[in-house]
Image (tube, rainbow, N blue to C red):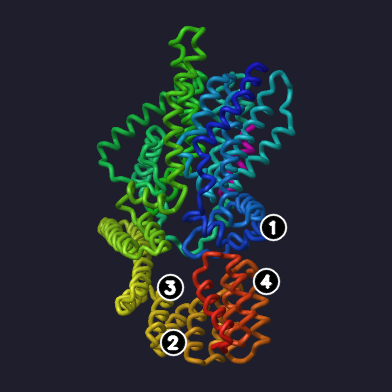
Amino acid sequence: MEEQTRKSFKFIPALLLAVVISHGGSVTGPFVWDDFFVITQNQALSELGNLPLFFQRSYWLEPQTGVVRPFRPIREAFFTIERAMFGLRPTGWHVTNLVLHATNAVLLLFLLRRLFGSFAVAAVSSLLFAVHPIHVEVVSWAKNSGELLAFLLAMAAILLYVSAVDKKGKRSVPLLPYLASLIFFLLALGCKESAAALPVLLALWATMLPRGRRAEALLWTVPFWLLSFVYAAAQVSLTSSGESSGFTIVAGHVNPIDRLWVSGKTIYLYLGMLSVPIHLTPLQIFPPTSRWLMTIGFIGGAMIAALGVFWLLRRRPEGFALIWCILAMGPVANLVAMNTGRPLAEQRMYLPSAGFCLLLAGLVVRASGAFRSRYRTAGVCILAGIMAAPLALMCARYTAVWSNRLSLWRHGVRHSPTLTTPRNQLANQYRDRGQRELEEAETSLAFGRINQQAGILIQHARTMREQGKNDEADAYFRAAAQFFRSQWQLLTRMGGIMRKRGKPQEAINCFENAIQGAPTYVPAHEGLALTLMELQKFEEAEKACLRGLKVAPSSAILHNVLGNVYARRGEFDEAQAEFEAAIEADAKFLDARCNLSLALAHAGQMQEAERELERTLQIAPESGVVYRAAAQVYEVAGQLEAAIEALQKALVINPDDADAKAMLKELETKHADGQPSR
């Protein structure tokens, strides 16, 4: 055993090198997709003093528009610590994920060696786990550090449990490692609910023990089951209901046969992704499959499960691995709820993939038995290398796809052309790069996909209604409603495109259609008012803002736009009142604060304007936008030197700020010519 321990420590550098080769490119990646909602826009993560907040019921019951927030207090606390360390610079977050993945691979090495006493099985398993391409999404996506941390804590809990229960001659179970195991399990649950599969793994390991020790080991798993049930109850009671995303069809709305059918199909597709990881993408298509083909798949799956049970009874690691892989997929197999927006996600395979890699390792080691005993170690190395090398290459290539948002969503559109979200995200990237024609093309295609998908869901709903299945029909109608909501979002985006392309009437039509379909959708009201304001139609712009404020009276955005309308008409008192209303709705709304300072300056209240600027700089001391606003305030007051100094500070913060450069050039010219300010 000591010899195998020495081998394990010597293998660590090779394992770390494999992680760096396959996933090292992730450290240069940006924040993507959910990172903005989960990390960058979550103000609760901005201060370490908020750590106790994540363990309070009120935080999780706070409504969240458009998303259901799971109860994950340890993950939120970990995010807060990361943000304190790295701010909003994505490199630090990605390095953390890389370190966590490397640590997990090393921990898996020691855990499997402890469970099965075979260095070869443990080494090959951890190597395949380190380089498997299905982990790219977990490692390269900053918000998935919760998944990585949950795995680390869960594996540590298993290792401590095994150390405590596998007494090896001791009369009683050591209490300290056993309690530590329970604590680590509880922390893992607080990171991600996928850790709830851990009691199943402990029970599987207990069944492999000799008969005299099996019953006691199973008995010691009972507290883990109890913690799982308590956590499940907390998850149900504390998860924010928020505003339903519409993409989730609760299992209670689907009959049990269809529920099992969808769950089995999900596991089948996940096993395909693990076995042949060549078409991985952030959004996987959930393809329709004929019943007879799925029946064949279920028969094959039942045979594989039976083989796993047979191996398990014979205490072979392959049986433990196969059952681990399949049962760990249970919480993410769409059995409790069907996520029609993202039914398949590679990040959910992090825990099951460890079992899959163990299965491959066991088969590799057994296949090496065909070599003569003196060449058996070389045989294991050759077979492991044949499997690991192409996986590492695919992993490195897929990691490069995640290196920037444009390549990521191009890849998503290429591999999932029928889905809306990749096209929508790709349109965002074209917009940010000023490629208006490409943005318009992708938006139009996404719009067509939404209509098609919503139509399919409505047809399903009507079929369910005709069959008297009203609950199922309501679930499908809610899912279709979410697609139509996306339609209004795309209409608003198309309006923005038309507005920037100098086609105001087409923009107005898009915004009006979006408002007609979704009267409470604030960005559509905002876009309409801004377009009318650019056309100098201030009265109509005012009416557009007031119409929006009737359905969304606390909208800081609409109060700010209405304030701009009044300011453009020279009604600075009314503008000041609207900007103050916007600030009351959102105290950190920088645009409203900057506009209030400018309105006060135009009204001749320079001292109040400067005080408002000081308050704004306290909120965002590194914002070039605030210094640009300060320059405008000083220009109104005729203080050109102060205005120039403010613009210079703005350019120090953001040297590529084109607006600040243009303003600075204009003010320097005026200052040199001795001209008065506007």
Residue under label 1: 48
- In reply to whether residue 225 is colored magenta, the answer given is yes
On screen, residue 441 versus residue 634, left or right, reads: left
- Residue 301 in percent (x, y) is at 36, 31
| Separation of marks 2 and 1 at Cα, in angstroms | 42 Å
Residue under label 4: 618
User: What amino acid type is highlighted by mark number 4?
Assistant: Gln
Q: Residue at x 57, y 44 (%)?
A: 97
Examine the residues drawn in magenta and state their main secondary structure.
helix
Nearer-N-terminus badge (4/2) = 2
Q: Residue at x 33, y 78 (%)?
A: 504
Disc 4 secondary structure class = helix
Viewer-closest of 207 and 619: 619
Nearer-N-terminus badge (4/1) = 1
User: What amino acid type is highlighted by mark number 3?
Assistant: Pro
| Separation of marks 4 and 2 at Cα, in angstroms | 32 Å
Query: Tag on residue 542?
Result: 2
User: What amino acid type is highlighted by mark number 1?
Assistant: Leu
Quadrant placement of the C terminus: bottom right
How many residues crowd mark 1 within 10 Å: few (<14), some (14–19), many (20+)? some
Viewer-closest of 19 and 673: 673
Q: Quadrant of residue 300?
A: top left
* Magenta-drawn segment: 220-232
In the orientation shown, which residue stands out farthest toward the front? Answer: 673
Nearer-N-terminus badge (3/1) = 1
Residue under label 3: 523
| Separation of marks 4 and 1 at Cα, in angstroms | 18 Å
| Separation of marks 3 and 4 at Cα, in angstroms | 28 Å
Q: Nearer the viewer, mark 4 or mark 1?
A: 4
Nearer-N-terminus badge (2/1) = 1
| Image vertical order of residue 516 relative to residue 147, above or below | below
